[in-house]
Each structure stands twice: as C-alpha cells, then as structure tokens.
Image (cartoon, rainbow, N blue to C red):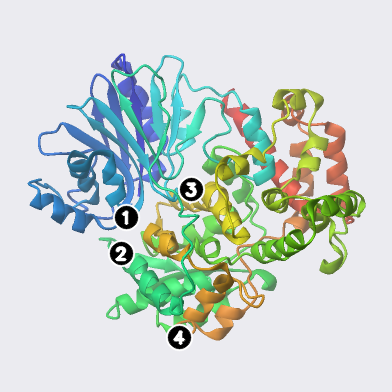
Amino acid sequence: MCGISGLFSRTGLPETEQETLRNINRAQAHRGQDNEGYYYNSHVALGHRRLSIIDLEGGHQPIFNEDGSVVVVFNGEIFNHKEIAAELVQQGHVFKTHSDTETIVHAWEEWGVECLQRFRGMFAFILWDDNRRQLFVARDRLGVKPLFYSCFSDGTIGFASELKGLKAHPLFCREFNASAIEEYLAFGYVPDPKSIYSQTFKLEAGHYFLFEVTGHQCLPVPQQYWDLPWDNQQPVYTDWQSDLIKHFKKAVEVRLEAEVPLGAFLSGGVDSSAVVAFMAQANQEQPVTTCAIGFDVADFNETDFAQKIADKYATNHSVEMVDHNDFALIDKLVQIYDEPYADSSALPTYKVCEMARKHVTVALSGDGGDELFAGYRRYKLHLAEETVRNKVPELIRKLLFKPLGKFYPKLDWAPQFLRAKTTFQSLAMNTSEAFMNSMSKLRADERNSLYSDAFKRQLNGYSANAVYQRYLKNKQFSDPLKLIQYLDYKTWLVGDANTKVDRSSMANGLEVRSPFMDHQFVEWAFAIPSSENISKGETKALLKKALESYVPHDNLYRSKMGFSVPLADWLRGPLKDRMFSVLQSDVMQQSGIFNTAELNKKMQQHVSGKFDHSAALWTLLMLGLFLQNESEEQR
C-alpha cells in the first residue's frame, strides 16, 4: 500500500513543478515510509511513497517497461499478477521484477485500457505512455483505494491519494462546494465524485481517465469500466451454501501473498470470524496472527467472542483494551480525513489499526460483508416498509403517513416500538426517498431548518437526494433489497467504509485487504436471491448458514454490535463543552451556512435529555472542527 501523486500539463510543465510534486508527495509520507521515487518529463511528473509488501528489493517505483517508454506509479495490490505476468511473458514481454506493479505497464502495452478487465485487486494508478503521449489513470472497481484530482488555474491537472497532497500545490482552490456541504450533512461524508472543495474531485470507483497531450479539455469525462451487476438475477438454486464457501475461500487465499508479517482483525463477528477461519485453513503450518481491541464499557466489548475464534483456530491472538473516552483522537481525525467525515466508528477503527501495526504490516478484514449479504438492520426494516408500500396505493400512503410523519413527536426517550416518526415519514415516500430518509444524519427538514437564508440561496434548491437519483437513472430494479444494496455500494461503502479503513490504516503504515470486496466474489454473490439473505427475519441468513461448520453458533447468531461509541452520552457529558465551543465559534458563524438560533436550539434539546440529536450534532461538530482546521491552515 502506498501513496501516489502526479502532475500533467498539455502545454508543458516548468522545472519548478518538480519541487511542487515533491511537496505533494511528501504531504502523503505516512502512506509509505519505506522510500520515495519520482519521474519527470516535459508533460508529466509522477511521485510515489512506498510501503513495501511484495518484492521488497525490486518493487521500487516508478516502474517502467523494457525500454522506459511506459511508466507507472501504483497504490494497491493486483492479486492475480502472477497469472497475468505468465500470460504476458508468453506474448514476449520481459519482466525485470516480481512486483505486481510491473504487471500494469506490460498489460497496458498488450491490451490498452482493456487491461483493467484483467486485474483482480484494489488499486489506483497513474500511467504515462511516452510513445502514445497518453496519461492513463484508473481506480479499482469497488473504490477500495482513493484517488483525488484537481484542475488548477494554469491548466495543470494534479492527482494524489489524499486531499492533503493536492492542498500542497500553490494553486489549490480552497473554495467550498455548497452542494458537497449539503451532501455531507445528509450522509456524514462527501460522496464521490465530489470533495468538499469546488475544484477538486474523486475519481469514482470502476472508472478511468485517458488524457491526450493533443486534447483541449482540461478534464476529459471519466469512463466507467465496471459496475455492480444490479440486474444479474439468477434463477432459484439449491446449492448456494457450498458455492459461497468455494468462492469466499478463493477470495481469502488470493489475499495471502506478502513478504512481510500478515494477520487479521478479529472482532468475533460473522465477517471477521469467517476471514480468520479460512486464513487458518489456507495455512495450517503457521498460526494466524489476530488482533482485537476491547473497550472498558461492557456494552461495547466483543473480546470474549473474538477469543472463541482465536481458541478454535489456535491463532496468535493479541488484545488491547481501549479507553472509550479517548477524546484526544478526535482532533487527529480531522487531520487524517482532510474533509468533514462523521462516522464515529473512525475512532475505534484507528485504534485497531494502530494496535495491529505493532504485530503485522498487512491485515485482512471483514469489511464489505454486511453490504454484500444484507447484514444491516436497516435492510430488514426497509423490506418491512416496502411490504406496506406495495399493498397500500401511493395516494393513500401520502394522505395517511405524511401528516403522521410531520406531527408525530420525536420520542427518543421512549421504547423502540414507539419511535415511529421516521417510519411514518418513510412510508409516505418511494423506495429511494425512504432509504435516503433512513440513512440521513440530518434529514431534509432538519437541514433546511438549520441553514441560513444566504446558504439556501447558494444551494438554489439542490438536495442531497440527487446523489441517489444519479445512480438510479435509467435503472429498473424489481427487487427493493437489491436497489438499496446497490445504493450502499455506490455511496456508503466507497465514501464511508472504504474511506475510514484506508485513512485509518495508512495513518498507521498498515495495509488492509478485505475478501468480501473481491470483485469476482461480489459479482457472484450479488446474484443471490434476496430471500436467501434475509430469511425469517434473520439478516445475512445464507452466509451464517454456510459458516455453521466454521464459526461457533454464538458468534454467528448473537446481536450485531459493530464499532459503536456512546455519542449521546458523550455530547451530554464530557464533550458537551467542546460541542458548544465549536458550534458557537466565530468560524461557524462566519461560514454563513447556519441559522445560529436553530443550531443552539438543537444542542439545548439534546443536552436536556428529551431528544437524541447525537448523530446530527456529531456530524455538525466534525464539520465545525474541519472549518476551524481550515482556518488555521490559511493563517
């Protein structure tokens, strides 16, 4: 795992841009502490920071083809590089290293952009072909590895693995994108392809750029080379369980190549337990190194479940207890993410990466299992709502549930079955609108009430719901569960989950690989009928059933915990003063985004204990901390 950077100019790069590139690259030094490398010519400058994993001696980047006319900087892993290299050698290509990176330059020579169809892995790369005078930039299918880009005022295009790299360019534009702020407050992250900055973007998962020196556009339109097979519904099949095991086993095995210590995260949940089980089976001569963190609050501590798996597979298991009230890390998160990011599980994720790095350089994880096999509670609730939507005509639903959703009180203090406000709101909506309502950190009416009149004018009627509508355009889903899983893959998985794991791991010099995000496994599993994944009220039913011979029953069928933190209590207790200080700060008021009176009202309601606004207030707090950091950077 590494950091990459690049500059491209059709009119030519001045020599001073070499120093600019070094600054961009070194701003990402944490992504690769082993060494750095550069390539310069009249149109292109490429930079690389290396965390050595494969071919420790020969894998230094940039890497070239035989005559030096093709050069690449690469972040990630091509897990099937040996098979591809063998095929390319038969075609006459000569390899100088055993690195997976070198496979890319030869594959480009042989197949052009179609080489992307051959790669099984997680990656972002920038490739320059001096003979064709083309720059080829690509990102993996599921967006595991990041890539940002920006078109500067002089026409130069910059690339970097993280925003902090591009921010090192003297022409970086710090103007905020108003629609990105609206999307952030809805989702808790800025969904691709936007960033918080108006002139900087993310290359979307499964997309590539092809730049021509002779072209005229600053930025060509990104081209999509892969999409989740949303319409690939297979007929009823009787042997899903055995095929699942076969495909998952392969997804694990291809991720075990490394010339450095390799292990796994182990929470004791379904997904991480499955990963460890098949790692242990794949290498019975050497015990798996597993890492877990525990919390000093019983409701959030899973270490007993992790220990069961560690004992079953005789792993070299390490556990560290973490203070649940480690607030010093909050300020570090602002530095790590470079733009507002409000998933509170980023705190324990950082801690488990920090802990794992003491033992291994590569860790396998269970990320992606919930999205693929419908493990989230929200999927089950959505299907229950969909049953009502199918039975009750839209007009009647709106007449009945819209007033209920508006006037029913927000009973955060009441038993779960009485907290029906969101459900009533959702039942008056269509499928995608309802899912948006359930996923929002701040729902549309909340956001609108918090915005200042000036910011509303700036938005000009724009709504974050446009994010979902963009992905659903020209698609017809017969299965409502597949629809929301598809939306999660396009938004949540890339923008939240993958971002969290990448930044947390790279900040600690750790590479993380997830078998559940193997694109071949995903393509196969996404065709599984929804009735297999949610069955008799059980989420992730097929996966659990298939794993019964490998994972103890208590681990499979216990209540899902996740990496939770007690936000509601924090914001009424130890973080209350910090919340008021940040959200009432001059920086927040000068941003012009918010109605100060409404913001204060929301804080007071939460502190009183009558309402739980913790998700909304944490999202606002992280935005406030970002704005403060941005102000300090510009001093």
Residue marked by disc 4: 549
Marks 2/1: CA distance? Answer: 9 Å
Which of the two discs, 3 and 1, labels the residue nearer the N terminus?
1
Residue 540 visible in the shown view: no
Which of the two discs, 4 and 1, labels the residue nearer the N terminus?
1
Q: What element carries label 4?
A: loop
Which amino acid lies under the numbered mark 2 shown in the image of this protein? Val
> Horizontally, is 295 left or right of 16 in the view?
right
> In the rendered view of the protein, which quadrant contains the C terminus?
top right
Residue 254, label in figure: 2
Image quadrant assignment for residue 284: bottom left
Which amino acid lies under the numbered mark 1 shown in the image of this protein? Arg
Which of the two discs, 3 and 2, labels the residue nearer the N terminus?
2
Residue 120, label in figure: 1
Which amino acid lies under the numbered mark 3 shown in the image of this protein? Arg
Residue shown at 25% from the left, 61% from the top: 259
Residue marked by disc 3: 503
Which numbered disc, 2 or 1, marks the residue closer to the eye?
A: 1
Image quadrant assignment for residue 6: top left
Which residue occupies the foreground of this view, 513 or 142?
142
